[in-house]
Image: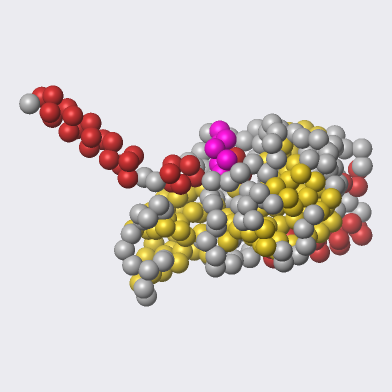
């Protein structure tokens, strides 16, 4: 009898893990700069969810529950947070908890001091370009992403991780909002999921840049490219080449910089390729 009880007890412990789908296990990293996967239940039509006033990606996980995939900003304080959910005319609030994560520092020396302290005419350009990119990050198309486990845009080692506190010539600037890969100039950059090209530009800081909308506010941005191989509005299949690695904009050498955004929040791309480090 005791052996049977132990077996049943062990099975009971295993049930929550078995009930959680693959996407939840892969993506649920609820820390500043991370992702929270919030269970919304299995009944009814597709819910609509918002977080901090922004619409949130909602999908059905492996034929099971609806889930909200929520991007958490680096500025978020650890502790309780919540999303607002609307379904079939009913409104509810669902909570989740944000944990702690420490991000280390990176110190970079740039010969071009204008890229640290821009001139007044540079600031006008930077403001214009920031507004353009912000509009792209806030895009929210209705389609469901082709895949949430993403492919690496290039085949190469990771270099600068997401979230680094960056100091340029000793002056602190915005944290590193993406993930860098150490690869040679000219390396093809491939879109990690199907999507639509929603912005192309050549920017003061980012250099040659492409935004790809994967659906429901799930967006990839690739920058510092030497060449762009797509056109605005182009529909891309998963694995399509968007451009080539370069060192345009504020870059100390050729590398591939990749941002991932959810609900207009930059999050750690390493989460989506199984390379997240707590």
For the N terminus, give its image quadrant: top left
Indicate the quadrant where residue 110 lies. top right
In this view of the protein, which residue sits in the foreground, 37 or 191?
191
Task: Give the answer, above or below, for where 192 lies relative to 135.
Answer: above
In the image, taking residue 189 as reference, residue 65 lies left or right, namely left
Residue 10 percent across, percent down from the top left:
23, 31
In this view of the protein, which residue sits in the foreground, 4 or 87?
4
Q: Residue furthest top?
A: 3
In this view of the protein, which residue sits in the foreground, 155 or 169?
155
The magenta segment is: 271-277
Q: Residue at x 56, y 33 (%)?
A: 277
Indicate the quadrant where residue 254 lies. top right
Residue 206 percent across, percent down from the top left:
80, 50
Residue 42 percent across, percent down from the top left:
33, 59
Q: Residue at x 70, y 33 (%)?
A: 156
Residue 15 part of the magenta-drawn span: no
């Amino acid at each position: 009898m005791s052996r049977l009880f132990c077996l049943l007890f062990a099975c009971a412990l295993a049930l929550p893990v078995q009930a959680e789908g693959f996407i939840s296990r892969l993506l649920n990293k609820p820390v500043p700069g991370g992702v929270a996967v919030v269970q919304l239940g299995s009944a009814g039509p597709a819910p609509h969810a918002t977080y901090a006033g922004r619409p949130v990606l909602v999908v059905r996980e492996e034929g099971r529950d609806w889930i909200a995939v929520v991007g958490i900003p680096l500025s978020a304080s650890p502790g309780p947070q919540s999303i607002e959910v609307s379904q079939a005319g009913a409104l509810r609030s669902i909570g989740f908890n944000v944990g702690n994560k420490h991000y280390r520092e990176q110190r970079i020396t740039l010969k071009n001091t204008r890229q640290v302290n821009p001139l007044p005419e540079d600031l006008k350009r930077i403001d214009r370009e920031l507004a353009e990119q912000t509009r792209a990050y806030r895009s929210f198309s209705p389609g469901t992403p082709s895949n949430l486990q993403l492919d690496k845009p290039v085949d190469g080692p990771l270099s600068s991780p997401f979230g680094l506190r960056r100091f340029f010539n000793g002056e602190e600037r915005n944290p590193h909002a993406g993930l860098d890969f150490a690869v040679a100039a000219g390396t093809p950059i491939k879109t990690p999921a199907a999507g639509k090209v929603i912005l192309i530009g050549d920017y003061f800081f980012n250099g040659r840049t492409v935004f790809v909308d994967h659906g429901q506010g799930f967006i990839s941005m690739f920058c510092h490219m030497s060449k762009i191989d797509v056109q605005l509005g182009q529909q891309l299949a998963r694995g399509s080449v968007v451009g080539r690695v370069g060192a345009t904009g504020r870059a100390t050498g050729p590398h591939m910089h990749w941002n991932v955004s959810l609900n207009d929040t930059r999050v750690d791309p390493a989460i989506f390729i199984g390379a997240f480090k707590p």
